[in-house]
Amino acid sequence: MRKTFSLLFAIALLASCGPKKPQMGIQSIPVIEVKTEDVPIVKEFVGQTYGLFDIAIRARVDGYLESIRFQEGGRVKKGQLLYTIDAAPFDAKVAEAMSRVAEAKTRLVQAESDFQRYKPLAETNAVSQSDYDAAVANKGAAQAGLEAAMASLEYARIQQSYTKIHAPISGIIGRSEAKESDYVGMAPNPVVLNTVSRIDTILVRFSLSELQYLQIIQYEKSRATVQATRDERKADIELIFADGSVHPHPGKVDFLDRNIDPTTGTLMIQASFPNPEKLVRPGQFAKIRAILELENNAVVIPQKCVQEIQGKYNVFVVSTENKIEFREIEVGQTVDDMWLIQSGLNAGDKIVLEGLHRVRTGMTIQPELTEFASIRNSTHQ
């Protein structure tokens, strides 16, 4: 009995002398300080691109297409010969008009000769007044006939000149709608042969709702009262390509349609973008990103700070005693990876940034203050 008691005492003593379980320490948790910013409210719209000038090349006279003098899809210069139409019928009309001019000149010479002969005779009453009047009238008619013949010749030459079609501007030319030996200039054959586009500046047309239009107007008014340079804020208009990349040159709105379309309730807007590399082509469907308004002194926080439970949004706030508090908030819209906060937070509040699953209400933590990228900086990237 005594041996058994001694053995139990020894076991208890060894157990009491063994290593103790360490006490859990205070956790270090990343937190951020809530900030306010002037936040641009950005919307995206879908539009279509156009050249600065998109000039249709038309056949102004009908005839057989004789030759094509350019490379389809290539660049052309202003005044460059593009098409020739068979000129033989127009050459004949010019020759016919020239013969009529010659006849009119002959009649005029004869009429002037008669007038010069009758004039001194009429002064001495050697001829009747009616004969003199007839000579004057014949001279006037011959002069008018010559002028008419000259006009017909000029018109024939103009028609003849239309058989050679030149580029109206320098730019990119498209695929020809007619081939050599096609009869052009009259339906059903194509009248519009091609299009030349100047694309060193590209135009984008898109539509805004009436409400969005009013928001833009209000934004422009507020911006006029705030001294901000372009380097300090996001570009007002951006062009986004199909792969998500952004056109390197910001645009500007240069045209608003006269009225809001009553059938759609939208207003057509045109923006222009420099295109010195000539990468953007007419006919593309483009995405436009535009600033509609400016939210002054808005409370913004990263989205990852916020939890959503059954439609309710909440954050973990760190008190001045470094204790965790659960707080419901009202969120507005998202801008990039940030929430705009309508209520529930104020500038200077500290909230948990990461490790939301590791904290609970009333828990004491060691806050690790962390900086986060502002909306102003993120929109410049």
Image (tube, rainbow, N blue to C red):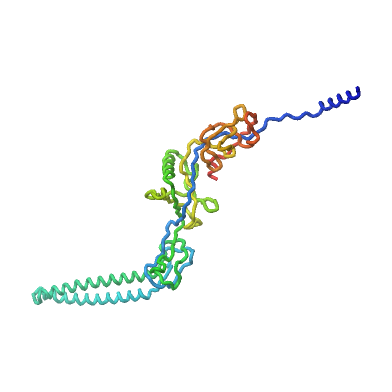
Q: Quick check: 118 above or below 8? A: below
**Image location (x, y in percent) of residue 87:** 38, 74
- 113 lies above or below 378: below
Given residues 208 and 6, the one toward you in this image is 6
- Give the percent coordinates (x, y) of residue 50: 45, 56
Horizontal side of 9 relative to 351 (left or right) equals right
Count of numbered labels shown in the rendering: 0
Q: Position of residue 141 (x, y in %)?
A: 20, 72
Quarter containing the C terminus? top right
Q: Going 82% across and 27% down the picture, which residue do you hit?
A: 15
Q: Quadrant of the N terminus?
A: top right
Instruction: Give percent across and percent down for residue 14.
Output: 84, 27
**Quarter of the image holding residue 134?**
bottom left
Q: Is residue 335 above or below residue 348?
A: below
Q: Is 97 displayed left or right of 221 in the figure?
A: left
Closer-to-camera residue (300/247): 300
Q: Residue furthest top?
A: 2
